[in-house]
Image (spheres, rainbow, N blue to C red):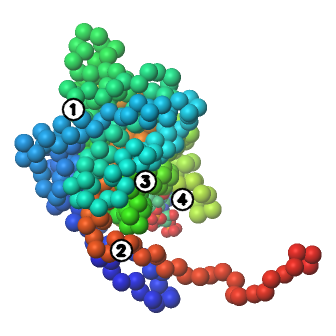
Amino acid sequence: DLDCFTHDPGFVATASCKSKITYIDGDKGILLYRGYPIEQLAEKCEFTEVAYLLMHGELPNENQLLKFNLEVSDKAIIHESLRKFFDGFHYDAHPMAMLVGVVGSLSAFYHSELNNKDPAQRFISATRMIGKMPTIAAASYRHSVGRPFVYPRMDLGYCENFMNMMFSRSSQNYIDQDHYIDQDFVKALNLLFILHADHEQNASTSTVRLAGSTGANPYACVAAGIAALWGPAHGGANEAVLNMLAEIGTAENVPKYIAKAKDPNDPFRLMGFGHRVYKNFDPRATIIRKTCYEVLKKTQTDDPLFELALAVEEHALKDEYFIEKKLYPNVDFYSGVIYKALNIPVDMFTVMFAIARTAGWVSHWLEMMEDPNKLISRPRQLYVGPAQRDYIPINTR
Ligand code: SDX
């Protein structure tokens, strides 16, 4: 149930809700999923184990995890008619545009799930969404490069299945190096998915909850979340970081861009820095930074981009503006560099974020649907427009 809105006109009411899913302490840099520290989950879990935890509130035992993994794999395949949706997109359509369109159209395939009445059915819808997201995401990429779709496989884990659908590579193709993927890269992807799985009432999750509170079906709610995530101030930041680094070009240019970011008259923001909640290091960025080193060492590319990213980080962390405003690198600052090292194209970075955040979105949707006061009362506004006035005929305007 929501905290009551204040009617004090001087206070812009903000909706708040109670949730048992994720806890963040922005000052201390603490992030807990259902009470478990993100550092422990990142180190010890597979992504689907964390998705189960977010959805059900408890870590699964071996049987529960085996059953959940089978259900997710079983739901990964998409209807052939849905696969044909991609033929309508031009090859240069942004993958996020394809994702938001195709996910929303899942509502046209599962009629019995549109009324959300049965709790058991709701968990099936949520599991279906987690299963299908990587398939639709990979299909968006394959369409954009004009390659045939690779179907999901029941014998591969969640992250490896995705990489196989993207690049038709698996860790079983030892002989054929072009179609082999190193398990360390699969582990890096697993880590990134866990770190991006949920983050309390961020913009896209709040969008899913708001849509869910009207009784809209889960596929429409997740499509709304994807649309909200796309913005560069939110999930689009990882793509924006790479575009920013490409624009900066060399370490010599870093001071110039730091100055631009500090200039109140310049709309330029240092992408990957700052956070609405963390006024300390984003704990996810701390974990990701270490993995960045490991992945880049493994790929043997001393990727100039990562060196440049470190130069930006070093300058910003020493700058008194960033220190005073408590602007630290956030999760998006390093994730883009790792995705690039894994040969994920830049326009797919926010799609990667969406795959992971689907676990959080559906968990919040499930929690919302148990909430007696489903409809999030519309946020009150502070009217600052013109006072009442009379119509003016067009010939006198
Ligand atoms: C995500 O909500 C979530 O949990 C989101 C997320 C998730 O997991 O869902 O964590 C994922 O969205 C991470 C954020 C990714 N976005 C970016 O990296 C884009 C760059 N960041 C900025 O757009 C900004 O930091 C925001 C939008 C993230 C937060 O903006 P706020 O709330 O304005 O930040 P703030 O109040 O701490 O800002 C304090 C000051 C402001 O200046 P003044 O008004 O005091 O003069 O710092 C400035 C801001 O203008 N500022 C920046 C800056 N971020 C804030 N100045 C330069 N560069 C920046 N990046």
Q: Quadrant of the N terminus?
A: bottom left
Residue designated by label 2:
16
Residue designated by label 4:
262
Characterize the local packing of mark 1: few (<14), some (14-19) or many (20 or more) Cα atoms within 10 angstroms. some
Residue drawn at 53 percent across, 30 percent down = 87
Pointer 1 or 3: first along the chain: 1
Residue drawn at 18 percent across, 56 percent down = 56
Q: Which label sits in the foreground, 4 or 3?
A: 3
Which of these two is toward me, 139 or 293? Answer: 139
The residue sitting at the bottom extreme is 8
Where is residue 219? Give x, y as percent. 39, 51
Is the C-beta of the residue carrying label 4 under 8 Å from the nearest atom of ligand 1?
A: yes
- Disc 1 to disc 3: CB gap under 8 Å: no
Q: Is residue 313 left or right of residue 383?
A: left
- The circle on residue 220 is 3
The residue sitting at the front extreme is 112
Where is residue 19? Give x, y as percent. 26, 68
Local secondary structure at mark 2: loop
Pointer 4 or 3: first along the chain: 3
For the residues labelled 2 and 3, the Cα–Cα distance comes to 22 Å
Q: Is residue 263 above or below residue 97?
A: below
Pointer 4 or 2: first along the chain: 2
Which of these two is toward me, 324 or 3? Answer: 3
Residue designated by label 1:
157
The residue type indicated by label 3 comes to Ala
Is the C-beta of the residue carrying label 2 under 8 Å from the nearest atom of ligand 1?
A: no
Pointer 1 or 2: first along the chain: 2
Q: Is residue 39 visible?
A: no
